[in-house]
């Protein structure tokens, strides 16, 4: 599965994407796996209220299932303007 990072999430992680093999059943399970990788991931996912997530380009919640998902993207909330 591809995991994409945008804006300040990318800056904290230090890369635009990862290719991961995961047994995560939900987005939150994936977040826990990523947090455990190393400190920069823990920092990027420290405040989930400041993040949005999309699974296969569909905006969703952190409790969304990952069964069959090919891509997960993490990004800050959008602002108008």
Image: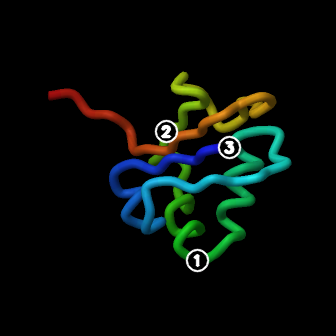
Q: Are marks 1 and 2 in contact (CB under 8 Å)?
A: no
Residue that appears at 34% across and 51% down: 7
* Residue sitting at x 81%, y 46%: 24
Q: Nearer the viewer, residue 69 or 39?
A: 69
Looking at the image, residue 77 lies above or below residue 29: above
Badge 3 marks a residue whose secondary structure is loop
Q: For marks 1 and 3, give the one nearer the viewer.
A: 3
**Label 2: which residue?**
52
Image quadrant where residue 54 sits: top right
SS at mark 1 in the image: helix
Q: Residue furthest bottom?
A: 39
Q: Which residue is mark 3?
A: 1
The answer to which image quadrant residue 62 occupies is top right
Q: Residues within 10 Å of mark 2 (few under 14, many from 20)?
A: some
Q: Can you identify the residue that label 1 sits on?
A: 39
- Mark 3 is surrounded, within 10 Å at the Cα level, by few (under 14), some (14 to 19) or many (20 or more) other residues, namely some
> Up-down: is 33 above or below 55?
below
Mark 2 and mark 3 residues within 8 Å of each other at the beta carbon: no
Of callouts 2 and 3, which one flags the residue occurring earlier in the amino acid sequence? Answer: 3
N-terminal-most mark, 1 or 2: 1
Q: CA distance from mark 2 to mark 3?
A: 18 Å
């Amino acid at each position: 599965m591809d995991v994409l990072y945008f804006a300040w999430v990318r800056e904290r992680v230090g890369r635009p994407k990862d290719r991961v093999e995961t047994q995560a059943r939900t987005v939150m399970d994936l977040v826990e796996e990523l947090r455990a990788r190393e400190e920069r991931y823990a920092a990027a996912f420290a405040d989930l209220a400041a993040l949005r997530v999309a699974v296969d380009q569909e905006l969703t919640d952190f409790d969304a299932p990952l069964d069959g998902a090919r891509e997960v993207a993490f990004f800050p909330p959008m602002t108008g303007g």
